[in-house]
Amino acid sequence: MDNEQQREETTVASSENRPHIFGSDPDGIRSHERVLFGHDRETGLRAIIAIHDTTLGPALGGTRFYPYVDEERALEDVLRLSRGMTYKAATSGLDLGGGKAVIIGDPAVVKSDQLLEAYGRLVESLGGSYITAGDVGTTSQDMDVIGRSTAHVVARTEAVGGSGDSAPMTALGVFSSLRAAAQNVWGSETLDGRSVGVEGLGKVGYHLVSLLVAAGARVVATDVSAQARQRVEVDFPDVDLVDDVLRVPVDVYAPCAMGATLTPSTAESLQAQIVCGAANNQLSTADVELLLTRRGIRWVPDYVANAGGLIQVAGERQRLTRADVRQQVESIFDTVEGILRLSGEQAITPGAAADQVAEARLRAAAEECHLAGVGV
Ligand code: NAI
């Protein structure tokens, strides 16, 4: 451990110009509970773990392994992402807080078992207040390695008792969200005959296409990867592969690739009535949601629609059966139905309604702790 250095900051001023904003308090008055910087000279590990809020339980969130240009960008990302996890867990009804971690560096160059083990020790040093999982740049196999030095890791492979790839459950959550939005917009949850534009045919997009095809939807899809397109072409010959789903008249736009595809410009030209997909941080700026709402387009907040993976790894911790996890993921339908109803009743955007639901749950839990005398 001589090699390893930890630097801790308990309150951190939030960064500015974030592309997506969670909560009605975007500028960070609701500050992070704990931020831990960890360095290990021997393996080159440079990591930041941010615990945003543990009112509902230990903070759970993935580890992003990414070649950030500098520590400031990495910090900005981890603060924003961990805040998002608080809201995701709260709206999903999970007894978990929000946290996230970043490892700075190109995983293709610097990732090693030794580095991941050193990172595991950093996670372990938090005594379970942060539980890690996979994210961009990390895999279930990496979680197995991290698990050699900490007990506080989920999303490991099935071979070691983990729940494996979360993409199928994430896709199921998006599909359930989409049905709830259809119910809200068209008065029927059926997707039979509806056209859905799926952008991104990777781990989640592929499974979503499979569910949509089985439900009788007409799927139009795109991916920048020829390999991903070819897999869909072979497995689902009725899917119409196009260059850009944003330019095609569809009933639903399902972003399942990168974030920030909803810009003021795409919001103005979008022909879909519903936007619901797995991609994180879909809005390029917070005001895009208002543009969508003004045009009568229903946006299902990304952190609600894509919570299936989080529900799966939470179930892994509780040793739930697959059937129970599946049922919980399908209940995202009710969450989305409630959020869209609230949005209609209060004439607020679905994003604001989702934030309200999350913040009400956080407030109630904090009040309960206070009454029980443990919130001092
Ligand atoms: P992935 O990396 O397997 O798939 C993404 C796909 O998008 C790739 O096939 C890629 O070629 C394609 N793509 C990239 N840029 C594109 C563009 N401009 N136009 C069209 N296609 C493009 O990722 P995965 O796991 O399927 O995740 C998709 C999204 O869902 C990501 O934003 C991820 O953060 C989010 N998400 C995933 C979860 C999971 O359980 N895998 C959980 C929650 C969110």
Image: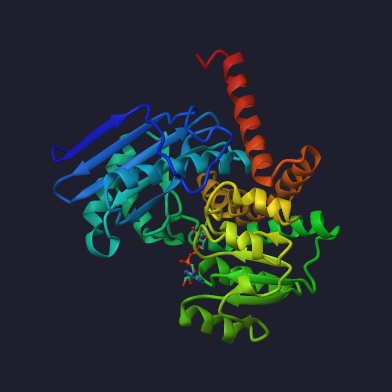
Q: Nearer the viewer, residue 375 or 69?
A: 69
| Left or right position of 47 against 204 | left
- In the picture shown, does residue 196 fall above or below 337? below
Can residue 156 be spotted in the picture? yes
- In the picture shown, does residue 57 fall above or below 329? above
**Residue 193 appears at what percent x and percent y?**
79, 74
Where residue 130 sits, quadrant-wise, is: top left
Where residue 156 sits, quadrant-wise, is: bottom left
**Residue 60 appears at what percent x and percent y?**
47, 42
- Residue at image position (53%, 81%) is 229
**Residue 306 appears at what percent x and percent y?**
58, 54
Where residue 36 sits, quadrant-wise, is: top left
Can residue 126 be spotted in the picture? no
How has the structure been colored for display? rainbow
- Residue at image position (52%, 75%) is 223
Q: Quadrant of the N terminus?
A: top left
